[in-house]
């Protein structure tokens, strides 16, 4: 059954249908949140759980106008931003913020993608994760992040260049 069909059943009170949606999307959602939280597994898991709880409460608001995974990612992004503001995890207006100096990375970890991703700004991490790791279009990623398409493209391009620089600098 399609995500739309499962969401319709879940909106009618079908816990099993919602359970299938969770099962189908939880690993991708947790991976997205893990990158946003710079590898903080406990926080990513907490945010994933909050995301699914909110999705259950708001499942009737899903209209099937876009992919369910995009709707879910938007909820996760919002939950992350709320947590980041609450705990002051990192600056949220990072469009002009430079990431940590790429040359300060230890040689042994330069090829560790997750550690390299953690060195990127929030905008770069989120755009790269959505567009390249999860396969969202620039337009879908812009909708999830609440940013203009051009900003998402800039974040993804800048992040990709920084990752390449990190990998080229490896011994």
Image (spheres, grey):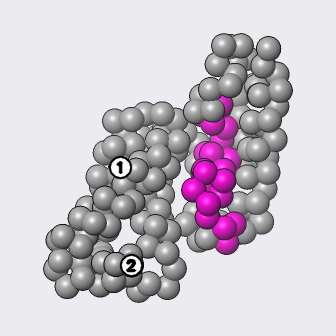
> Would you identify the image quadrant in which residue 19 lies?
bottom left
Q: Is residue 27 above or below residue 100?
A: below
* Numbered-mark total: 2
Task: Report the span colored magenta.
Answer: 116-139
Residue 136 visible in the snapshot: yes
> Would you identify the image quadrant in which residue 127 lies?
bottom right
Q: What residue sits right under mark 1 in the picture?
A: 47
Residue 57 visible in the snapshot: no
Kindly check if marks 2 and 1 are in contact, taking CB atoms under 8 A apart as contact: no
Give the x, y percent position of residue 78.
Answer: 45, 60
- Mark 2 lies on a secondary structure that is loop
150 left or right of 31?
right
Q: For the point 69% across and 66% down, which residue is it? A: 138
14 left or right of 71?
left
Q: For the point 61% across and 64% down, which residue is it? A: 136
Q: For the point 48% across and 33% down, which residue is it? A: 39
Give the x, y percent position of residue 47.
Answer: 35, 49
For disc 2, the neighbor class at 10 Å (few under 14, some 14 to 19, many from 20) is few
Mark on residue 2? 2
The reply to whether the magenta stretch includes residue 70 is: no
Q: Residue furthest front?
A: 1
Q: Nearer the viewer, residue 109 or 95?
A: 109
Quadrant holding the N terminus: bottom left
Which callout, 2 or 1, points at the residue further toward the start of the chain?
A: 2
Quadrant holding the C terminus: top right
Is most of the magenta stretch helix, strand or loop? helix
- Mark 1 lies on a secondary structure that is helix
Q: Nearer the viewer, residue 117 or 20?
A: 20
Give the x, y percent position of residue 119.
Answer: 65, 32
């Amino acid at each position: 059954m399609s995500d739309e069909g499962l969401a319709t059943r879940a909106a009618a009170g079908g816990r099993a249908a919602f359970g299938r949606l969770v099962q189908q999307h939880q690993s991708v959602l947790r991976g997205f949140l893990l990158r946003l939280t710079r590898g903080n597994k406990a926080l990513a898991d907490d945010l994933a759980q909050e995301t699914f709880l909110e999705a259950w409460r708001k499942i009737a608001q899903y209209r099937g106008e876009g992919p369910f995974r995009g709707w879910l990612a938007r909820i996760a992004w919002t939950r992350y931003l709320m947590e980041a503001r609450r705990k002051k995890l990192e600056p949220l207006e990072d469009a002009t913020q430079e990431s940590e100096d790429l040359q300060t990375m230890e040689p042994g970890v330069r090829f560790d993608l997750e550690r390299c991703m953690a060195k990127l700004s929030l905008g770069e991490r989120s755009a790269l994760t959505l567009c390249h790791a999860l396969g969202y279009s620039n337009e879908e990623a812009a909708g999830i992040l609440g940013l203009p398409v051009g900003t998402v493209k800039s974040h993804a391009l800048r992040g990709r260049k920084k990752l390449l620089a990190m990998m080229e600098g490896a011994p």
